[in-house]
Image (tube, coloured by chain):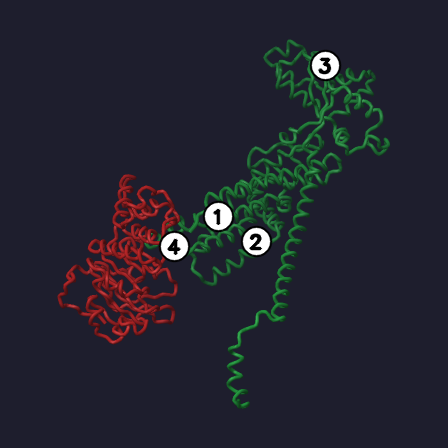
Chain colours: A green, B red
Amino acid sequence: MNNAAMTSRPAEEETMQRPTDWKSPEMVARIRKRYRSEKLFRTMGLVALTFAGAFLAFLLFTMVRNGLPGFEATEVRLNVAYTEQSLGVSAADVKGPNGLETLRNADYGLLAGDALAAKLGIADPNEIMRAERMVSQATSTILRDHLLANPSLFGKTVPVWVPAASDFDMLRKGNIRRDAPEGVRRISDDMLAYFEKLEASGDVRTAFNTRFFTSADSRDPELASVWGATVGSLLTLFVTLLISFPIGVLTAVYLEEFAPKNRITDFIEVNINNLAAVPSIIFGLLGLAVFLGTFGMPRSAPLVGGLTLALMTLPTIVIASRVAIRAVPPSIRDAARGIGASPLQVVFHHVVPLSMPGILTGTIIGMARALGETAPLLMIGMRAFIVDVPRSLEDPATVLPVQVFLWSDSIERGFVEKTSAAILVLLVFLMLMNGLAIYLRQKFERRW
Amino acid sequence: MYANNETPMTEATNSALKMTARDVNVYYGEKHALKGVSIDVRADEVTAFIGPSGCGKSTFLRCLNRMNDTVAAARVVGDIRLDGEDIYDRQMDVVQLRARVGMVFQKPNPFPKSIYENIAYGPRIHGLAKSKADLDEVVATSLQKAGLWDEVKDRLNDSGTALSGGQQQRLCIARAIAVNPEVILMDEPCSALDPIATAKIEELIEDLRGRYAIVIVTHNMQQAARVSQKTAFFHLGDLVEYGPTSEIFTNPKKDKTKDYITGRYG
C-alpha cells in the first residue's frame, strides 16, 4: 500500500464514513451528565412547587385558625320580664290601636339589669350596673326589636339569648386568660365570678354567629357584621361588570376585526397595555376628580366605586379578549364569509362565541382584582363607618377589603378575629366567582 | 390568452356563459401574481384549473368570489362578470355575491356547531327559509344533494366536527349548496382526503354538474381529466392554455402544457 495514497483520499472517506461509536466512554459520560441535569431540574421544580404549596397552606391555615372563632359568638340567656312595670307602659295602651308605637317608645334599659339581678341574687344598683357590663351595650335595642317582632310576649317573662359583651366573648374563646392577674385581664375578679356563675347554670353559650351575616358594621365587635360590606361589594362589582364587560369586549372586537392596521391602532394598543399596569390608586384619584368633583356623584356609593373600578378593569378585559379573538383560526372566518356572512355576522355568530372562554377568563381575572381593591375606593370615600346595609347603588356603602382594613385598624381585641373572618368571607366570595367562571367556560368550550 | 374556442365538441359547450373574466391581473404588494388572465365559466360545465404550486390558480379562484378582498395587500385589476354584472362594481353587494358564488376550501372547515346548524346557518342569514319546516326541508335537500343524508339523518344534532374528513368535506359542500348558489368554487377539495373519500367527492361533482357551474382547482391531473369539461393550465401567474379537457390532455397546443401533463415537471 502506497502511503501517499492512504493519507489523501482514503483518509477523507474514513472520517466521513466511520460510524459513530455510541458506546465509547465519552459518549457514556455524556449520557450520564444529561440524565443528571434533567434529574436536577426536575428536583428543583418539585422543591419550588413544595415551597409555594407550603407557604400557601400556611397562609390558609393561619387565616382559618384566626378567623373561625369570628364565626362564633357568645350569648347570655336572660329571663326577661316584658311587663308593664319594667317597661313603664300600661296594658291598655299596648292593646289599643297604637300598641306597637307604645311598645317602640317604651324604656327597655332596665330589663337586662333586672334579669341579671334575679339570676345572680344581687340587689345593690351599682352592682347591677356592673353586672350589666357582661352583656352587649345594644341589649336594650335587641330586646325592643324582639318584643316588636313578637308583641304577644307582652306581659310574660321569657328567656332571651342576647350577645355577651366583647371582653367576655374573648374570655370564652381563650383570648383573655382566666388565670391572668386582674390588671392584665381587663375583667375584674368580681365580674369574672358573676360570669362563671352564669356559666355554671348553663346560661352562657358560644354558637354560630348569625349576626355576623345579617346586620351591618358596629363599633362593638360583638355586633359587627360583614353583611353590609358584602352587599356593598356585590353592588360595586355588579356596576363594574356591567360597564367594563360590554365596553371591553366591543373594543377588542373592533380593534381586532374592523380597525385598519395602521400607526394609530398600534399607538392605541401600546397605551391599553400600559394602562393595565397603572397603579390602582391613580384610578382612585381619577374617580375623585371626575366622578365626585366634576359630576358631583354621591360619595361612597357603589355606583361611583363601580365606575372607578370599571376604568381599572377595562384594559385587562380588552387585552384578554384581543388574545382570545386572535386565537380563532382564520378557517372559521373564511368558512363564514364563503357562504355570504356579512362582517358583523362573521364576528358575532362565529368569532366571538369561539373566543368566549378566553374572554371570560380575562373578565374573571379583572373582577377578582376589582373585588380585592382597597386604595381607589378609599380615595372616593368608601372608608366611612357605615351602619346600614346599602339598599341601592347610591346609598353609602363599603366593600369587603375596606371593611377588613377598617377593622384591622381598631384597638378592640374582638376585631382581630372578625378581620380574619371577613378575609375568609372574601376568599369564599372569590372562590364562588372562580367557580362561576369555570362553569361558564365549560359551557362555551368548543373544539375546532 | 383567451382561447377562442368555437369548434363544437362532444361535451356540451353551448351552455350559457355564467362568469367571464377578461385580462385579470392580481398584485400582492409589489409581486405581480396573476398576469392578464381571461377565462369563461359556463353554467353546465365543470372547469378545472391545473398547474404547479404557486402558479396563481387559487389566487384566481378567490377573485371569482372576492375572497381576496380580505387580504389587505391584494389588488385585483380587470373585468370579472357574473351573468354580465361586474362583480367588482361598487353597486355589487359582496355578501350576496358570496351566496351566489359559493366556495369549498381545501381543508374541510365545518362550523363547530351541529350538522343541522351548519347547513341551516346560510339560509337563515340570507332569509331563504320562512319557517322551521322550510329550514328542515332545505337542510334535508342539501344533505341529499351532497350525498350525506343517509349517513347523518339520524344524528343531525351531532357536532359537525365529529365527522370523518370526507364527510366533513361533503358537509361543507352541502352547506354551500344550501344557499342556492349559481356557481360553486372548489379549492383543491380532495387534497386532504383519502382515495375513497376523493372518489365520493368526484362522484358528487358529476351529480352536481348541470345544476351549478363548478370551478375546481386541483393538483391532481387525473382528477381534472375525470371530472371537468374545460381545463385551464396556469404557470407562474400566466394562463398558458385553456380549452376543452380532452384536447388539453391529448393534444395540448403549448409545450409548457405538454411538459406539465407528461409529468416532466411540476
Q: Chain of mark 4?
A: A
Which of the two labelled residues, at mark 3 and mark 1, occupies the earlier sequence position? 3
Between marks 2 and 4 in the image, the one whose residue lies nearer the viewer = 4
Q: Nearer the viewer, residue A37 or A15?
A: A15
Q: Is residue A72 visible?
A: yes
Which of the two labelled residues, at mark 2 and mark 4, occupies the earlier sequence position? 2
Q: Which residue is mark 4?
A: A333
**How far separated are the C-alphas under marks 3 and 1?**
65 Å
Q: Position of residue B210 (x, y in %)?
A: 19, 55
Q: Nearer the viewer, residue A301 or B265?
A: B265
Residue type, label 4: Arg
Q: Residues within 10 Å of mark 1 (few under 14, many from 20)?
A: many
**How far separated are the C-alphas under marks 2 and 4?**
29 Å
Q: Quadrant of residue A426?
A: top right
Q: Secondary structure at mark 3?
A: helix
Q: Is residue B91 visible?
A: no
Q: Position of residue A267 (x, y in %)?
A: 51, 60
Which of the two labelled residues, at mark 2 and mark 1, occupies the earlier sequence position? 2
**How far separated are the C-alphas under marks 4 and 1?**
18 Å
Tag count: 4
Q: Which residue is mark 2?
A: A276
